[in-house]
Structure formats: C-alpha cells, structure tokens
Amino acid sequence: MILGLKLDAIPKKIEAPESVEYQRENLLVSCDPTRLNFDVIHGFLSNSYWSPGIPVDVVKRAAANSLCFGMYENGKQIGYARVITDFTAFAYLADVFVLATHQGRGLGKWLMECIMAHPQLQTIRRWMLATRDAHNLYQQYGFSSINEPKILMEKLSPGKYVAADHQPPKPPEKE
C-alpha cells in the first residue's frame, strides 16, 4: 500500500507512443525521440531568451521526461516543441521554436496543429505556457492570458542552468 491505496488501484503510467507522426510534402513532425538532433535543439535553446546558457545534459534530461515534437524538412531538424504532461488533465507547452531560416512559412502554426491533434493530449483540461513574443500564434489555438492571475504561483530560479553544479540537491541527512 502507498498512501493508503492498494498498488493495483493505482493506474499504470501512460506512455506516449513514439510513432505519432504528421507528414506534409517534404516536412515531418514526429514524436519519435530517436530522431531528435540535440545539436540543433541545444544550439537554439542555449541562445534563446528563456534558457540562455542551458547545458546540453539539461536539454536532454528535459526531453527525456517530456512528449517531444521534432519538425524535420528533408530529414533535417528545423523545429521543436515539448509538452510536459500527465496525459490526463494538465499540460505545459515549452521550448517551441522553428529555426529562423525556416520562419515565415506557417511552420509554427503547423507544429501547433500537430501538437493539439496528438491523440493522447485530447483529454487535457488545462494547457499552460509562457511566452514573451508569440501571443498571437498561441491565441489561434485557444490560449489566452490568465483570467485570475492571483490563483497561480511560481518559484523561479534564474541562473539555475548555469550554476556550477546543476545536479539535483541531496536529501537532508538524518540525525
């Protein structure tokens, strides 16, 4: 028993299928983590306003614990997004980008359409994201500013990614 619940009463973790893909001409959006090019992803994210200097191992760990969407043109990665979710009620959309050389072609919209169409994200009641510059894009998919900002809280740790030791803290020692 855990927290008073029988172990067989706790549902098993939902695993996202790796084969969900969307094709359009020579473009592909895929949730297959083996396709992800971490040189491209890290190169973009480490220079973005939301995660400057993020170490590649942190990018990889975040991807490993998220539902990732890679966008590819002729097999080369040109975009990315990840969803942190329980696959039931809540999802947080993060790290969305299309490389600058591929912008202006509606690819951000198509990436969002693919994310919102994913079969295992159809029961999500609350989606959240943070953006400084793409409000118009996300509003097209039902996102809006928080109606009641006083009900939300955050714990923000700026500079955490570039700390000398970005390993999880050790638990307190027993006395």
Image (spheres, grey):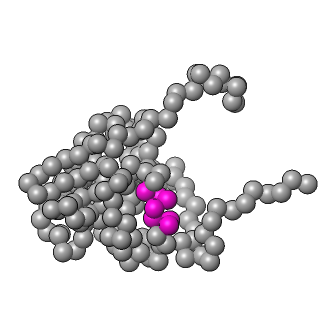
Question: Which residue is pictured at 15% across the width and 57% down the height?
Answer: 27
Q: What kind of secondary structure does the magenta stretch mostly adopt? A: helix
In which quarter of the view is residue 129 placed?
bottom left
Is residue 68 visible from the viewing direction of this image? no
Which sits in the foreground, 75 or 12? 75
Q: Is residue 101 above or below residue 9?
A: below
**Range covered by the magenta-colored residues:** 57-63
Q: Is residue 2 above or below residue 165?
A: above
Task: Inspect the magenta stretch and tell me whether residue 27 lies in it.
Answer: no
- Give percent across and percent down for residue 140: 21, 52
In which quarter of the view is residue 134 placed?
bottom left
- Give percent across and percent down for residue 104: 14, 69
Question: Which residue is pictured at 91% across the width and 54% down the height?
Answer: 175
- Give percent across and percent down for residue 139: 25, 54
The quarter of the image holding the N terminus is: top right
Task: Inspect the magenta stretch and tell me whether residue 60 lies in it.
Answer: yes
Question: Which residue is pictured at 47% across the width and 58% down the height?
Answer: 62
Question: Which residue is pictured at 49% across the width and 72% down the height?
Answer: 55
Which sits in the foreground, 73 or 149? 73
In which quarter of the view is residue 25 placed?
bottom left
